Image (cartoon, helix red, strand yellow):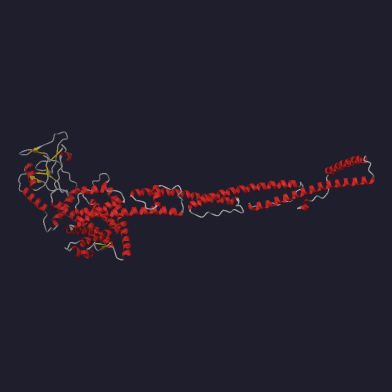
Amino acid sequence: MRENMDIDGSLSICEDTRVKRILQSVETGLRSWYSIVNTFGLNENDKVKWEEELQDEIEACVNDCHAAAIEKQQALIDKIESLLTESEKMCKKLTIQMPSFAPTNQGLYNDEKYLIELVKGWQEEITTRTVEIDNLKTRRDEVSKSLGREPFFVKESPLPSRDEIEMYKIKLQELEVEKQHRIEKFRDLQERIIALSDEIKFMPKLDFERDIITGDNLLFFEASDENMQRVEQFHFDLLEMREKIEQELNKLREALEHLWKVLEEDVKYCNDFIQTHVGLNYKTLEAFKTEVKRCELIRKTNLGKFIVKLRTELIDRWNEAGFAEARRAEFAIYMEDDMFTEDLLTLHDMQIERVKAYLRNNQEIFELLKQRDVLYKRMRDLDERANAPDRFKNRGGQLLKEEKERKAVTKKIPCIEEQLLNLAVQYEEKHGEKFTYFDDTIESLIERSREVLEQEKKEQMSARKQKRDVTMSSSKMTPRVLYKSPSMAQLSTRNHLTPHNLRTPMRTPKTAPARRVLTARRSITKAKIRLSTDKKKRIAAMREQIKSSKRTEPNENDIEYSKFEIEMSRKDGAARSTISLQSPHATLLKPSIRIETPRTVDKQLKTFGVKAKLHF
C-alpha cells in the first residue's frame, strides 16, 4: 500500500511553477540577508559561519516541512488501511462480499473520503438490522413465554440477511396468530365452563378452577400448552359431570316413575315434584335420590303387592322383546315363588332391567320390526280397498293416491327387510347366536310374512270368486223384472200397453191424448219395455244354465221366488204388468206377472221381501 502511494518526484507544470516561485522567494530572502550581513563588516571567516548557520536553518526548515508531509502521508495511509479493515469486518457481519479496492489517481484524501462514505452506509445497515433483530427477539421471547415454548433461534453474528429477517418475521407472525387463537379459544372455553358450572352448581376446589370461573388473575394468563390442556381438561371434566348427572337423573327418573306407578302415587304430587326439581345439577340429583329412597322404603313394606305388579310388567316386557317360553323358563321359578322377600323383589327388578337393556341394545331391530308390521298392515288395507265394491267411486283422485302409496310401501318393505337381515347378521357375529323373536329368526319371520300375505291374497281372490259365483247363481234364480218410470222410459203418447196384452203396442197419433184403459178400481198406464237382443239372448242362456245345473241345496232366494210365482199364478183374471225388482247383483227379465190391483201386488211383494215400484 505504501509503495503504491510513494511519490515518484515528477512534478506537474503548476507544481514546477510553485517550486520556482518558492525558490525565487528564498533567493530574494537570501539576497536581502546578504545585503544586511555585508553591512556588519564581518571578515570572511565570520561571514562563512553566518552562511553555514543560515544554510543549516534553511535545511532544517525544509527537512521539518518534508517530515511533516511524510507524516501526514503516513497518517492518510493508516486511515485508509483502517477503513479497509473496518469495511471488511462490516461485510462479514452483513454477510456480503467485500468489494475490491485500489488507490485512485485522485490522491489519498479522495480515497479516504470514498471509504468513509462506504463504511458509513454499511454502519447504517448494520444498525438497522440490529434494531430489527432486537425487536424480533423481544417479540419472540414474549410470544414463546406466553405459549410456553422455547424461543426459536435468531442468528446474531453474522447478522441475518434481509431474506432471513423476513423469514423470522413470518415465523413470529405465525406464533402471534397462534397465541391470539389460543386466547380466543380460552375465552370461549371460559364462557362454557362458567355456563356449565352454573348449570350443574359446581363448586371449584382448586385455585386454577376458581380463577377461571371467577375471572380473577387472568390478566397474566399464559396460553401455554400446559395451561390450555388444563383448561380443556377442566371443560371436559365438567361435561363428563353433566353427562353423569344426566344419566343418573334419567335412571332415577325412570326408576321413580316406575315406583310411582307401582305405588300408585298421586298424579298431582308427581307433577309437582317434577316441576319443582328441574335442571341437571347436583341439587336436583340429590332430590331424586331422596325421593327414590322414600319410595323404595314404602315398596319394601308392601313386597307382595309390588312383586305381583313387577311380574305383570315383566310379562309385558317379555312380550315386547319377543321372548318365547324357553327364554322365560329361566326365570319361571321366581315367577312362581310365593315367599315375598326383598331378594325376590330385587331379582324381579334385575330381570326387568335385563329385558330393558336387551330392548335398548336391539332398539333398531325392534323399531324396524314395528315399521315392517305397519307397512304390512297398510298393504292389507290397500288390498282391501282395491277389492272393495265402491273402489271406482273415485273422488279427488283417491285411486291414484292409493296406487302411489302402494308402490311406495312395496319399495319400503324390501329395504326394511334387508336392514333387518344385516342387523341379524351383526347380532349373530356379536353374540354368537341368532336373533329370535318368539323363536322365529328374522329370515323365518320375513318368509312367513310373505307366505301369509300371499295366502291372504289367494283367500281374498277365492272369496271374491266364490261370492261372484253365488251372486251369479242367485241372480239367475231371482226374478229381475224391469220397469222404468215414465220419466226414465220416456213415455210416448203414441205407444200404450193394454192390461191384457202388454207386448202389443197401440199406435195413436202424436197429437192425440194419452189413452187410458180402466180396470175395476183405477186406470193403469203402461210403459214400453225396451229389451235389446243381447239381453234376451243372455237371459235365455241363463235360464238354460239354471235348468241344467244340479244344486244340492236350494237357494233361499229361489225358494222365495218360487213361492211368489206359485202364489201369483193362482190369481185368475189379473192383468199382466211389468215390475222392476231391485237386486244388488244382477238384472234379469222375468215373464209378466198377473196381478189384480197395484195394492195387492205391493202387499204380496212386501211379503216376499221384494222391493217394487209400480207406476199406473
Q: Is residue 565 left or right of residue 541?
A: left
- Residue 311's x, y, as percent? 20, 59
Please tell me which residue lies in front, 402 or 1: 1
In this picture, is 567 found above or below 331? above
In this picture, is 330 found above or below 184? below
- Residue 243's x, y, as percent? 33, 54
- Residue 41's x, y, as percent? 94, 41
> Residue 521, located in which quarter of the rendered image?
top left
Quadrant location of the C terminus? top left
Q: Is residue 296 left or right of residue 172?
A: left
Please tell me which residue lies in front, 319 or 51: 51
Please tell me which residue lies in front, 495 or 47: 47
- Residue 250's x, y, as percent? 28, 53
Task: Work out whether residue 380 can be spotted.
Answer: no
Residue drawn at x 46%, y 53% as measured from the top left:
224
Task: Work out whether residue 515 can be spotted.
Answer: yes
Question: Across the whole image, how many numbered discs are drawn on residues?
Answer: 0
Please tell me which residue lies in front, 318 or 274: 274
> Residue 546, located in which quarter of the rendered image?
bottom left
